[in-house]
Image (cartoon, rainbow, N blue to C red):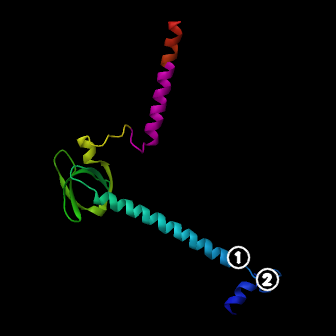
Amino acid sequence: MSFITLFTEGSTGGTTSGGFNFMPIIMIVLLVVVFFFMYRSNKKQERQANEMRNNLEVGDEVTTIGGIVGEIVSIKDETITIETSKDRTKIRFLKTAIRNVDVSAAQKRGEVPMNDKPAEKSAKIEKAEMVDDKKEAVEEAPKADEEK
């Protein structure tokens, strides 16, 4: 069976009445497009992570991929040393082990304004704030009625 007959025969093995079957070609093209977008998004994330790791400074508060939080006290070629507690425990990591920068040294110095609210809040905190807001609204409503 030749390559051309694979596309000209239907699923039952006979020839189709319409001639050429485009379905396999469409599936291959869709597969290539999906892989292209997956590759592109992974490259973008990798580029952002490398940029973050190259811009690390002494004084940044970071979180590692293992969940250890600390402040950078020294940076060498491919390693950094972070201080993790009040006891000044120092641990050395590879730069690639840094997941994100929580507070940059520039924010600590006041060069960059600190965010009022963290970008990601847990659902429990948001629910607690909503409950507090409702309680405050209920407490304020009777006070408004008493003033009249």
Q: Residue at x 16, y 49 (%)?
A: 88
Mark 1 and mark 2 residues within 8 Å of each other at the beta carbon = no
Q: Is residue 103 toward the left or the right of residue 90 in the image?
A: right
Depicted 56 relative to depicted 24: above or below? above
Overall secondary structure of the magenta section: helix
- The one of 131 and 29 positioned closer to us in this rendering: 29
Q: Assess whether residue 126 is covered by the magenta stretch.
A: yes
Q: Residue at x 72, y 89 (%)?
A: 5
Q: Position of residue 42 (x, y in %)?
A: 45, 65
Check disc 1 and report its element: helix, strand or loop: helix
Q: Is residue 137 left or right of residue 69?
A: right
Q: Amino acid at mark 1?
A: Met
Residue beneath label 1, please? 23
- Residue 64 position in % (x across, y down): 30, 56
Furthest residue toward top = 148
Q: What amino acid is labelled 2 in the image?
A: Gly
Q: Around disc 2, counting alpha carbons within 10 Å, would you say few (fewer than 14), some (14 to 19), or many (20 or more)? A: few
Q: Which mark is residue 68?
A: none
Which residue lies most toward the front here?
A: 111
Q: Give how far across and how far down residue 148 sits, in percent.
A: 53, 6
Give me the residue at 27% from left, 42% from top.
111
Q: Is residue 84 visible?
A: yes
**Front one among 108 and 92:** 108
- Stretch in magenta: 117-138
Dividing the picture into quadrants, the one containing residue 6 is bottom right
Q: Is residue 94 magenta?
A: no
94 vs 89, nearest the viewer? 94
Residue for badge 2: 19
Residue 65 at least partly seen: no
